[in-house]
Image: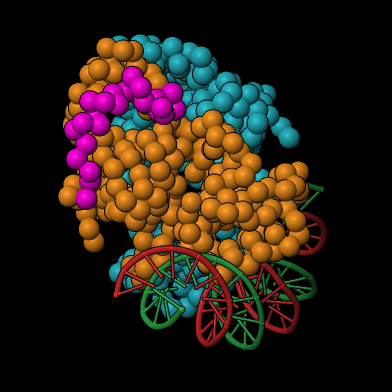
Chain colours: A cyan, B orange, C red, D green
Amino acid sequence: MPSFDLGRAREPAAQTEMNPCGACPVRSLTVCAALEAEELRRLAEILQNVRFDASHTLFSEGDTADILYNVTSGTVKLYKLLPDGRRQITGFLLPGDFLGLSVNETYAYTAETVTPTTLCRFPRKKIEALLEEFPKMQKRLFSMASNELAAAQDQMLLLGRKTAKEKICSFLLLLSQRASRRGHKENPVHVPMSRADIADYLGLTTETVSRTFTQLKTSRVISLLEGSKVQIMDMDQMLDLAEGA
Amino acid sequence: MPSFDLGRAREPAAQTEMNPCGACPVRSLTVCAALEAEELRRLAEILQNVRFDASHTLFSEGDTADILYNVTSGTVKLYKLLPDGRRQITGFLLPGDFLGLSVNETYAYTAETVTPTTLCRFPRKKIEALLEEFPKMQKRLFSMASNELAAAQDQMLLLGRKTAKEKICSFLLLLSQRASRRGHKENPVHVPMSRADIADYLGLTTETVSRTFTQLKTSRVISLLEGSKVQIMDMDQMLDLAEGA
DNA sequence: CCCGGACCTTGACGTGGATCAAACCCTTGC
DNA sequence: GCAAGGGTTTGATCCACGTCAAGGTCCGGG
């Protein structure tokens, strides 16, 4: 079980200087949106830019939680395992998302990159000190946590009560909405994760995910494009299918 | 769809005076734990004690979220519905739990009492003003939200990947742990909610919940006592069953 | 260009839990 | 005491999705 491994990270010092927070493309989406120029400078002092290949484990469930991250590009998945290997992915993180917050001293889940990913890396202690100093940041973090909580409740409804088809449609719509909130085009949706990852996120198997995709394709609700893109052909029907209406 | 209905609340003025926050039995568990005497006094000024019968709807999904609550006794369930009536209970709240936080201006779920319940009632605006003034309270609220987020991820693992038997065992253990954290005896666990509520919390049907209970009873892992109490007879096996080990 | 391996799709079949349908409690009210 | 109505249990049957097993497709490396 590989824990955090700086060896695989490209040396980031130069990049840290060249791309300070002021020029950060995802600033408006994340904690940093709350900060003034001077505060940003303080934040930049304790941060490191890091880059990882796909399928790199950032940290594992149970590791001591002394590093926090902010995704700046790429996709990260969070998951929990049962002793026999069954896996539940609890979230996919996109640019602007924050990870590593933990209640006790250890991470409650494993974090692994899905695609090549760049992140800001913060020592937990230093972030906590900064939070004391900048209540605006504290407040912003709280509001992000509230959003995540609401999303978690939606996901519980999905996992507990939706059918396979409803799950897949909800998932595609979620990706679409998240893309548009980040200023990307929302219709051909980019779906960077594997069928297996989608299955473990939705509480299904790869086979069922695959079958459901072809079923949606056959009924002309979606069509599969080059480069893991999915075109939503009939948005109205998609919205209905996602809620079982 | 009955929204908040003060008519059914016992007039609480006297009680508010007689049981101010200083004497609150759940204070150590909730937001208020972070506050000093003077701050508590300020909080007490904006709070009302209210009491409701069982099966009373505090608010519905989509209502304007201008009231927050803190449970002081009893049990409350939170749920979301699909258009066709399928229901997912996203949480059961016990004394000390907080509810009503919302991202937009509306509640993301319906809240309904399971048993007769007493709560502290806060106008949202006034709480928000107080939060600005008391960063300790802000911080405490954030740490409570982080805890809830971790619990939500456990619940996703349960809903997406556990079998019926594992779900029921996990649920009973959760109730047991929460009781003990509140200083109640953890072994004969009090299970105040109906089979239908348990089913909607675990993503099952009442029939399956009932069958699983009898199955656990037959294999002498639990036994059902008077007054909706469940005795865990074999705690080790229970712990194994909950994780599929 | 061809090979190997990872991922995806498709098919045949099995099953855990849902559905449908009674009975069987308990209360509570008359 | 008895009837009515909600919750719970139990049984018989069904089916959505899982499991098992091939193929198919794509891609990177020799």
Q: Which residue is drawn at 62% across and 31% down?
A: A59
Q: Quick check: can you spot residue A115?
A: no
Front residue of A130/B134: it is B134
Image height check: is C3 above or below B125?
below
Task: Tell me the quarter of the image containing the C terminus of chain A.
Answer: bottom left
Image height check: is C6 above or below A224?
above
Q: Residue at x 41, y 27 (%)?
A: B25
Q: Residue at x 72, y 44 (%)?
A: B235
> Left or right of B78: which side holds C23?
right
Residue B30, horizontal then vertical, whole percent: 40, 28
Q: What is the tally of numbered marks visible in this picture?
A: 0
Q: Quick check: can you spot residue B116?
A: yes
Residue B197 within the segment the image draws in magenta: no
Image height check: is B57 above or below D20?
above
The magenta region covers: B8-30
Task: Tell me the quarter of the image containing the N terminus of chain A.
Answer: top right
Residue A196: image quadrant is bottom right
Residue A42: image quadrant is top left
Q: Residue at x 60, y 27 (%)?
A: A106
Residue A53, horizontal then vertical, whole percent: 60, 37
Front residue of B106/B119: it is B119
Residue B208, horizontal then vertical, whole percent: 59, 67
> Left or right of A18: which side holds A61?
right
Residue B29 within the segment the image draws in magenta: yes
Residue B93, horizontal then vertical, whole percent: 42, 43
